[in-house]
Amino acid sequence: MASIDAAKDYGSDHMPSPLPRSETDVSHNYSLLDYYGMDGFDVHDQGSETSYVKVSKDVPLSKNEGDGAIFPPPVEVTGSEEPPALQPPTDSKQASSALLSYKPVVSEIDKKSILHSDYDMYGFKKDSSFFDSSKKQYNEWFGEYADQLVQQKKKWKVLLKNNGLGYSTGLPSRFPPKSDKAKKLVRKGIPPEWRGEAWFFYAGGLERLHKNVGVYEKIVADTDGVTNKDTEVIERDLNRTFPDNIHFNSSILSDEKIETEKIKSLRRVLVAFAHYQPQIGYCQSLNFLAGLLLLFMNEERSFWMLVIMTERILPKVHSANLEGVHTDQGVLMLCVKEYIPRLWQIIGKNFEGAVLSDDKILTRLPPVTLVTSSWFMSVFIGVLPIESVLRIWDILWYEGSKTIFRISLTIFRLCLDHPQFSNEEKKQSDSSESEQIELFQFMQSFPKSITDPNLLVDKCFKKIGGYGFGFLSQDEINKCREFVAQQRSKLRNKALVTAEMSDMEREALKIPETPEIHDVYGFHKSVMNGVAWNKHLSSKMKSKFRKHKP
């Protein structure tokens, strides 16, 4: 996909009719989909040079097996579909199983108790060097936010009642069908104590559970005591999962280091997942996805939600060759190029400062993708403060994977509008190496300061006073994913792109880790060291960080 000007060069015969949409400050009344009708590139080797020849969009692409396969469009639940009205299994034997038991982390919002505690309502430390926050700062924000949560829950109760879904005790297990009213409330936030039930309902978890009754328990039994490469890495990562949370790290509250129940549950979920999804196995960041789910639901539900996440929300993102990461980063960069052109002029370069041409964007993504890749793999865990992460997940399970792209564009715009970014942008006129590093560091650290989730969500969706990225549809994202995957597949078949690490990249993995280049929990260190589309880029980044470290 090319920019608007490049698209015009192809002539009107190649352009489909524009999709109708309302004008916003970023949409310009055109869609990324408008350009999928353009001819793509075929690749022919001519000696040592590579030439790009246009091929008709009507020519079918070969679908190779394995890594070369065309990226499958994820099956998303559309807004018009009503989740199945199913109830959880009631088998008494299952209900008594330890795998299915769950003690809510958040049972009610006690504002006074939370304000006096050193931990938030989810068990995370308020004093956090990760996010440069203190208990005082947290309490100043939460004092007002807690009142909002109370009012928001009242609105949810009214919506449930109006849909004939009133409940007397416990948690609601069914929620209203998808509608404009429900979507508006979801974007304003799901009550924390209802979050697990709502996520599971809107993600289609009940249907998945009913089709696989007893499957999780059987997998856990079959994998008990199993030792392999996946389990070895899982064991290493267990105690690295949320080290600032009392439910995962017992040493926070006691001098005695013991394994918490959440860690035991996390082990079973991850081992079962690696067994159930052998094409993925275990990949760093899955521990954080599963860990966050376990704060809001039992093991079995967390397992199936992790399956749904990797199959439908983030297809192939956690696969062994990380092709889904490459694809989604290509989609994100194309979105930035079209919808935030001013930012693209700054970041749309390789590390030497050369502007990436249209035909090189998908093969050599810019260095900023070393930051944004973790946004997708972790779904913003460790990137944003926890309440902002949870509000994004509320929307994600209701609206689909387009949410990740919308929020990513919003973070980019917030960075672009920040005074410090503007100062760094002015320095870019010299294009010096140190100034590129400073800009890179700012885009990595800034999201950690977005404590107020209302700011992030409002900026994302509001057309007046916001950026209006709500126009970016799931259909648009799905087709853009398919387009990027097709182009990468054709290029890979001609050996211009490789999904495997080169010898140089493997050598880069031996370089000692530098904390400044990684996000707070460090879950994506080995992943980001070997980003396949930027050959040896991680090694360059590390050496430059050392060189310019104050």
Image (cartoon, grey):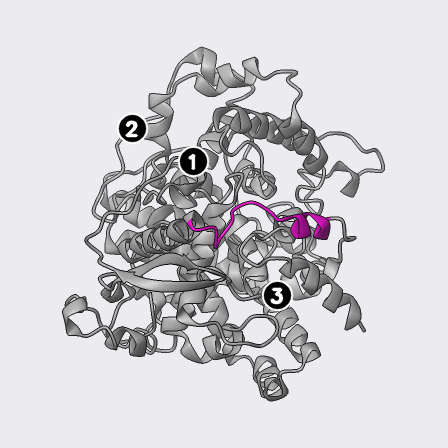
Query: Which is nearer the N-term, disc 2 or disc 3?
Result: 2
| Residue assigned mark 1 | 66
How far apart are labels 2 and 3 at the CA level? 42 Å
Residue 430: image location, x then y, percent? 63, 88
Q: Name the one closer to the observer, 437 or 240.
A: 437
Is residue 242 a member of the stretch shown in magenta? Answer: no
Q: Name the one closer to the observer, 290 or 42.
A: 42
Q: Amino acid at mark 3?
A: Gln
Whether residue 389 is visible here, answered yes or no, is: yes
Q: Which mark is residue 86?
A: 2
Q: In the rendered structure, are the residues bearing label 2 and label 3 in contact, judged by CB atoms less than 8 Å apart?
A: no
Q: Amino acid at mark 1?
A: Gly
The residue at the point 36 percent across, 72 percent down is: 338
Query: Which is nearer the N-term, disc 1 or disc 2?
Result: 1
Which part of the image, by quadrant, shows the C terminus? Answer: bottom right
Residue 483: image location, x then y, percent? 32, 55
Query: Which is nearer the N-term, disc 3 or disc 1?
Result: 1
State which mark lies toward you, 3 or 1.
1
Task: Look at the numbered disc 1 and give the secondary structure of its residue.
Answer: helix
Residue 393: image location, x then y, percent? 45, 50
State which mark lies toward you, 2 or 3.
3
How far apart are labels 3 and 1 at the CA level? 33 Å
Callout 2: few (<14), some (14-19), or many (20+) C-alpha neighbours within 10 Å?
some
Q: Which mark is residue 444?
A: 3
The residue at the point 48 percent across, 36 percent down is: 306
Residue span colored magenta: 494-509
